[in-house]
Image (tube, grey):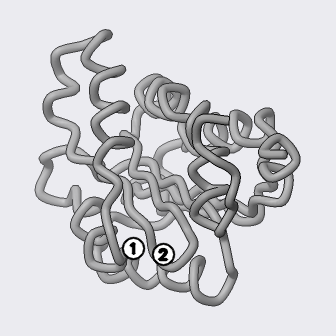
Amino acid sequence: MEQVFSRTCRCGVLTLSDKGSRGEREDTSGPLLQEMLRARGFTLVLARIIPDQQPLIEQTLVQWVDEEGLDLIVTTGGTGVSPSDRTPEATRAVIDREVPGLAEAMRQASLQKTIQAVWSRGIAGIRGHCLILNLPGSKKAAGENLEAVLPALEHGLYKLKGGDADCGS
């Protein structure tokens, strides 16, 4: 039942990068995440690169959820501690509730690879019936983070959309 559900999930990948938005740096994490989601059966509807500007991030997230009706948004970039890294703050400003277990699982997976994962501030949260995940900006870390939670996403999104199958079934 859930395998069929993923094929109806509409998702978007939002890359946050000042240099990438100006064409000064190639986005490598966004295309990887798109490929990973498609391979898992999700329908990619939107992909965009925008600057690390909190109001613009908030506006884009709200538009993608409220107007475009996405079920899943994966962001990449802006989760560190640089002055311009504002993705968690922008996400927190637009969500109704957090899902800390997803962020914890992603950080734990990254900590298996590098101690620098302690600096990642990405969060996961829900706006309406849409899950928003913040991933790091590096291609390697973004892929590792999504891989860590991908097996759980289908069931969680199914439940988020009102699915009534038991969790243990």
**Element at label 2:** helix
Work out which quarter of the rendered image holds the C terminus and state it. top right
Classify 10 Å Cα crowding around label 1: few (below 14), some (14-19), many (20 and above): many
Of residues 163 and 121, the one drawn nearer to the viewer in this rendering: 163
Q: Which residue is drawn at 53% across and 59% down?
A: 14
Q: Disc 2 and disc 1: Cα gap in Å? A: 6 Å
**Element at label 1:** helix
- The answer to whether residue 28 is seen in the rendering is no
- Circles 2 and 1: CB distance less than 8 Å? yes
Residue 104, image x and y in percent?
28, 36
Of residues 1 and 154, the one drawn nearer to the viewer in this rendering: 1
Amino acid, disc 1: Ile
Where 8 falls versus 30 (above or below)? below
Q: In which quarter of the image is residue 12?
A: bottom right
Residue 154, image x and y in percent?
66, 45
- The answer to whether residue 165 is seen in the rendering is yes
Of residues 56 and 25, the one drawn nearer to the viewer in this rendering: 56
Q: Residue at x 58, y 42 (%)?
A: 167
Where 118 falls versus 158 (above or below)? above
Q: Nearer the viewer, mark 2 or mark 1?
A: 2
Residue 66, image x and y in percent?
58, 87
Q: In which quarter of the image is residue 137?
A: top left
Residue 135 marker: none
Question: What residue is disc 2 on?
Answer: 61
Amino acid, disc 2: Leu
Residue 165, image x and y in percent?
70, 51
Residue 57 marker: 1
Classify 10 Å Cα crowding around label 2: few (below 14), some (14-19), many (20 and above): many
